[in-house]
Image (tube, rainbow, N blue to C red):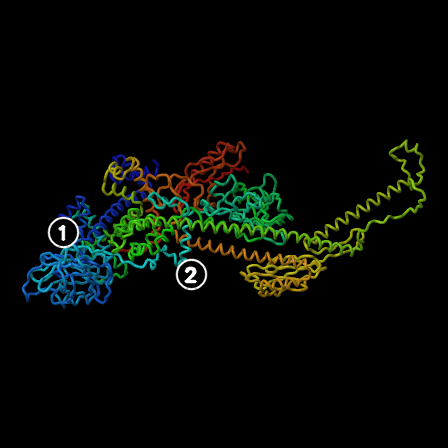
Amino acid sequence: MRNELKIIELTEKYLTGQLSASDRAAFEKKLAESPQLQQDVALQKELMAGIERAALSESIQRAHRKYKMGKSGLSWGVGTFLVIVAAAGLIWFAGHSPQQTRPLPGHEAIILSDSTDTIALDHGRFEAGMNLPSQPFPIYNDRDTVIETKAGIVFAIPAGSFLDANGKKVKGAIQLDIREAMDAAAIIQSGLSTTSGDQLLETGGMFYINASQGDQPLQIDSTKGIYAEVPAEKRDPDMMLFEGKRLADGSLDWVKPTPLEQYLTPVDIHSIDYYPPNYLDSLAATGNDATNKRFTDSVYYSFAADFGDRPTKNEASKTETLLSETVSAGQVAIAEVKTDLDRRTDATVVSTPPSKPDRIRGDVSWNSITDTVAPAPRVSWETSAILIADNLYEVVLTATIPPGWRLYSGSVGEAGPTPVRISVAPSLCAAMIGKLNRAGEKNKFDKNFEREVSYFVDKAVFKQQVRARTDNCRISISITSMLGNDMMAYPIQNLNTSVLLNNAEPLVESLDELLDSASGAYPKGINPAKIKAIWNDKFQNTLLATREFEERIPAIHRTCSGAVLDLYVRHSEKRLDEIDALAATLLTGEERATFEAFADQQYGRVKDGNRFASMLRGYYQRKTTAYTKATRKTHERLWKEHQRNNRNAQSEKAKNTRENKQRASRTYTEEFKMNLAKVNEELGIEKTRPAAPPAVYPVRISRIGWKNVDKYTGMALADIMRDPVGNGIVSAENQRINDSIDARRQRSAEAASVKRARKTDVQDATRERKTLDYTHPMTGKQATIAYKEVAIPIADGDDYDQVRVYLLPDRLSSFQRLYERDGAFQGSLNELLSYQLVCVAYKGNQAYYNAVNNLTAAVHNSPLALEPVSKHDLDVQLRQLRSPYRVKSMLAEVHYQRFEQAESVRQNRMRKRLNLRNELRPVVFPCGTYTIVTEDDEEFAESASVDEDLNKIFKIVEEMPEFPGGMTAMQAYMSNNTKYPQSAIDARASGTIYVQFIIEPTGEVTNVELTRANRFNHDCDNEAIRVIQNMPNWIPGEQDGKPVRVQMNTPVKFTLN
Amino acid sequence: MHDQQILELLRSGKRDKALLRLYKHFPQVERLICSKGGSKEDARDIYQEALIIFCRKVKSVEFELTAGIGTYLYSVSRFLWKDELQRRQKKTTVDFDLDLTPQDEQALQEALERENNLKMAEQVIAGLGQRCRDLLQLFYFQSLSMKVIADKLQFSSEKIARNQKYKCMERAKAKLLALKKQATIQSPDLSLK
């Protein structure tokens, strides 16, 4: 047995006097020493008294209930009683103010015949109640009759209700004499009493009914009875029916109370609200029309899809365990994603159907040795990629550094801290442009490493420009970093992450998340398909279509138990209070009490209803299944369609990107050629022509045959044979020739390299659109290619869904795009060209347009205003552009933009729908989600606060344990209390020992152990353990609001000075 | 039904029966409370509290019935209602006197305080699962042996039942502690005088 439980056992024995004298003394001694134990014992004692009190309370409440029902027969208590008497008596009825005239159905009572209580009275003697005015009603006993009195009591008299003195049915006309006292004045005047024995009654009214045929007094057929509905302002469930017993003094005593027949109040099923509580309000709060029933129905019923094909038998059973929604623990880095260059597996397109198992989002996956070190500080990284030019992205990595810590950046050699290293894996689809840019470094002397290091605090920002060669390019980045502060350095963290280079909105990715959150685990709640199955005419005039049932609907929804609802449907021919009681047995705690209270209301059945109850049972089941299936199918169909559209969008996008690239490359080449020509011209360099020979040898040929143009070298062959290589026997002539050949070769090589360099310069300038001032290294001539910056803001640019700005140069074959930065669309214009600027924007399905001819290269301050334009007009405008080739590409571009806009509208619609569902989900299923528990929980598997294994050791919890005073205090404690063992000093041993321990729910430090075998010195090991063990109690960690055991690690560093 | 008989029933453990009998005094109390500005629910709650105090008193050895039970219950209810009114209206002068001797009043005051302190514990117990509650009540209140309880509640063995009882207690203690912590943060001015 665990320690804690042992203590409880001991305390129990102590408090109940079961300890032996010596044990008791020992216990009391310990008690005196430990205030903690004192508190513990006091709690337990209090609980024991509380148990007693709780038991008493329960008994008393039971008694109260019984008392109210008056079942004991002896004590009638105070309550309100309904009284009905036999034909020859007076009838008391409980009701309220006499003003109301409408009878409230449900107050029917059977008038029993009882003719044994009448006492022959002398005329002239006082008879209470008989001075009330008589209301005569002549009726026929052979017919059903309904009569209504002045005060509004309605009698329904079936044919043949009256018998003569011999018990035979009377035929023909009879006289009814009805008297009523429905208000206080009438009651007092008539001398009627309001007591039963010595008990006070609260009355709502009394009436008297007598029947006779001629002189013959009649009785009511006791096997049948007649029905009376008595008007009342408010139904009091304590009402009973009393009979009047005439006493000797002429007064009436009220006896034999019987409960009323509580009929239910049928209502039109379509007027009932079967939705979960707050559903309509929440729907209205999202800005939707909550009065449109078709809409509210369709949204609500769509949630049936969440129930899908899962087994329905587990919907509500006593052994259910409710899991709270998965919590994402702590700070989040980007989840690890494999580099995936295969476009078809679209990392951005959701390719999984909604029925995915629950995925814990916000998963931290550090592939680091330190992921169990709970108190270790962590750097959290965020990545993003911004498009700054055609296919050029700026990838930004932002590190958030926990306060008090530094992120080391510069390398200081082996013994120094590990600098942060960001490496981008080489990728087929992307090229790095330039170097990694860092911002915000500081330089300071670091005590840990005893040298000057550079580091970041708070935030570190790294930027890298990347050119993407394909669309949907994902680059993989790994980051290594190390944190430290004045006291210690924390081990290295490694992180792999990736960034997607894609200039489309990551709409689909976020949809993925939305969907995942939507379709998580199996919802715990009532399947809307069930509601749909009952909310129709088939269930009119059944128990489900009554005011009384309507009162129960919110409570049923709150139980989140389909089984409870099923009970009402399946047993709809039973009494409502019986079903209430059945429901109570399925529940526990407060819910149980709620339904027990319902049962106390003692409601009965619908009058004349439920003849088809058994047929409806089958109907209900069939329809529920059918609706669930259908909803799910619709969902899946919508889903597939969405995916199809996504795929289509992807391919359109890819096509567009391809075209863009071709266009860009074509334009680039053209511009480059143009630039180069200009430079060459300015440098005076002729265009390359086929080289003319420097001189010619004119010869005349008069005979066919071999010819040769030669001359004598002045050397004999014999000489050459002697010195083949010709070292030193090279004639001056040859030398001169060789030299000039060499010189020419060299000159042309130089010229070629200069030409190459010039070409490169011009290429760079063209690509980067920067001004080039070129000086020919050999001639000193200068040439310039000028680019000038242009910036132009678009009026109300943020109001549009999409804005695109195009530059149309007059001499190139296609356009270029400008991108927005700092509120204006920026780019550079080549001085050699004149440009036309075209802007097309979209808001919803409406397009807007404007154009500027001969755009000047400057920073334009006045924004360009756009005019709304129709699709046709836009095409017309574009066709007026100067070159037909340009027109074609502009049209294609604009067409694609239109497509993108439509896509975006569609995605928005989808997202809106999903958002709505997500917002409403907690209203429709207020109990969250759960997973099906299959193992038998033997003991207390009842509610969420049920037995979890209290021995479980957590590594990460919602509230991590804390050393009192925080990390700084802990560091102070460590440094103050750690004693460097002498033996280690002597042996010059130093290093870091990793210790793990558990923080108990009480905050105690237990199970102190060394984690890794990098023990360098035995004494240091022990010292480390000792220091940790002697730590003061921590503030324990909490999960789900309860303190739990948490495992922690920490390094203990021994360094020699 | 004589008072003595009721006491007998209580002492012999036939609590439910006794309590039912005791409800016959309810109408008076109800009338009193309703006439002093209370609702029917108030009357019900006050009467229940009065019954609890009464039952406790009966259990204690020094109980002497000096007046009728009805009268006693009536006095206690009156006292409780005055106290409740004071708490609600925060007026120290409530216009009906209690007709009690000072030491009676003192005793009642103490009883009320004790009960109030236990309300938290009661809340905790009520918040435990049904099985836990049953287990604890059968053991502590009805004082059945673990063997009998294990049988009654269908545990596989006495040892398991005992373990579960301790676990229940542990949970209850934790909850009570948490509740108390919460209460001390927002403790109102609990001056009962």
Which class describes the residues within 10 Å of circle 1: few (<14), some (14-19), or many (20+)? few
SS of the residue under disc 2: loop
Number of on-image labels: 2
Q: Which mark is residue A289?
A: 2
Which chain hosts label 2? A
Q: Which residue is mark 1?
A: B66
Tell if the residue under mark 2 belongs to the same chain as the one under mark 1: no
B172 in relation to A781, above or below: above
Residue A644: percent from left, percent from top = 52, 50
Question: What residue is drawn where x is 36% and y is 48%?
Answer: A622
A729 in relation to A597, above or below: above
Q: Which mark is residue A154?
A: none
- Quadrant into which the C terminus of chain A falls: top right
| A287 left or right, relative to A173 | right
Front residue of this view, candidates A50 and A390: A390
Residue A315: percent from left, percent from top = 36, 46
The answer for how far apart the CA atoms under marks 2 and 1 are is: 70 Å
Q: Amino acid at mark 1?
A: Thr
Which chain hosts label 1? B
Residue A50: percent from left, percent from top = 27, 46
Residue A564: percent from left, percent from top = 32, 49
Q: Amino acid at mark 2?
A: Asp
